[in-house]
Image (spheres, rainbow, N blue to C red):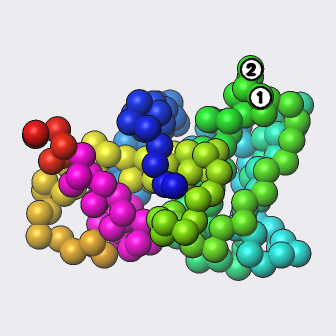
């Protein structure tokens, strides 16, 4: 299932905002490559043997490295970098079970899948949540939504440099959480 409990979701959202702040990001679109570099993680284009691979992150004694599929669209590459940073922040920190040198390869054909048939691992769902929070930070998107209430989803997606489907999911989620807070 797609569900991540509310406490963990809030924790992931807060971590993404801290990463943005620490990386000196303060407006949309987020420069996700600059965020990776601020964390000491270089990002390289790659030609994977399996074209379904969107990206990979490797942790070594020297730090981390991200590779992204050079043949995917720019918005897909941005999401992939943010997703891999999610693994870094959420799952590869010192003391985490994944803290030993390792490789993580993500095969993901659709950006932020939400169909009920797909029940990716908890770590993958969390990395997707982090990617959404990093590229479409709640307070920034909410301010944009208030400033431009008549914008179509595509305009928000363009402002965030994300896919329309990822933006639609984020806006729907924001609407649901806003209504839940009013009740």
Q: Is residue 127 left or right of residue 168?
A: right
Cα gap from disc 2 to disc 1, whole angstroms: 6 Å
- Tell me the residue that label 1 is attached to: 97
Q: Is residue 131 visible?
A: no
Residue 82 place in picture, x, y as percent: 57, 52
Q: Main secondary structure of the magenta part?
A: helix
Magenta stretch bounds: 156-177
Q: Is residue 152 above or below residue 174?
A: below
The image quadrant that residue 52 belongs to is bottom right
Assess whether residue 173 is covered by the magenta stretch: yes
- Which residue is nearer to you in this view: 3 or 65? 3
Label 2 close to label 1 by CB (< 8 Å): no
- Extreme-top residue of the structure: 95
Quadrant (top left, top right, bottom left, bottom right) of the C terminus: top left
| Mark 1 element type | loop
Please report the residue visible at 23 percent of the width from the left and 52 percent of the height from the top.
176
Can you tell which mark lies on residue 19? none
Q: Is residue 49 above or below residue 68?
A: below
Give neighbour class at mark 1: few <14, some 14-19, many 20+ (Cα, 10 Å): few
Per the image, label 2 sits on a secondary structure element best described as loop
Question: In front here: 146 or 90?
Answer: 90
Residue holding disc 2: 95
Q: Residue at x 41, y 57 (%)?
A: 29
Which x, y percent locates residue 50?
A: 83, 75
**Residue 132 seen by the camera:** yes
Residue 150 position in % (x across, y down): 11, 70
């Amino acid at each position: 299932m797609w569900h991540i409990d509310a406490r963990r979701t809030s924790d992931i959202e807060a971590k993404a905002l801290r990463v943005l702040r620490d990386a000196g990001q303060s407006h949309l679109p987020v420069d996700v490559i600059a965020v990776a570099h601020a964390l000491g993680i270089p990002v390289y284009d790659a030609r994977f043997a399996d074209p379904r691979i969107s990206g990979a992150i490797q942790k070594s004694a020297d730090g981390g490295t991200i590779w992204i599929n050079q043949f995917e669209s720019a918005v897909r590459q941005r999401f992939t970098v943010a997703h891999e940073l999610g693994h870094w922040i959420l799952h590869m920190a010192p003391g985490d079970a994944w803290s030993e040198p390792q490789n993580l390869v993500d095969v993901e054909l659709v950006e932020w899948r939400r169909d009920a048939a797909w029940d990716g691992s908890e770590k993958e769902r969390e990395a997707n949540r982090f990617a959404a929070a990093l590229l479409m930070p709640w307070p920034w998107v909410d301010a944009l939504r208030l400033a431009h209430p008549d914008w179509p989803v595509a305009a928000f997606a363009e402002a965030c440099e994300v896919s329309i489907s990822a933006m639609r999911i984020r806006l729907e989620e924001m609407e649901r959480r806003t209504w839940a807070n009013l009740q």
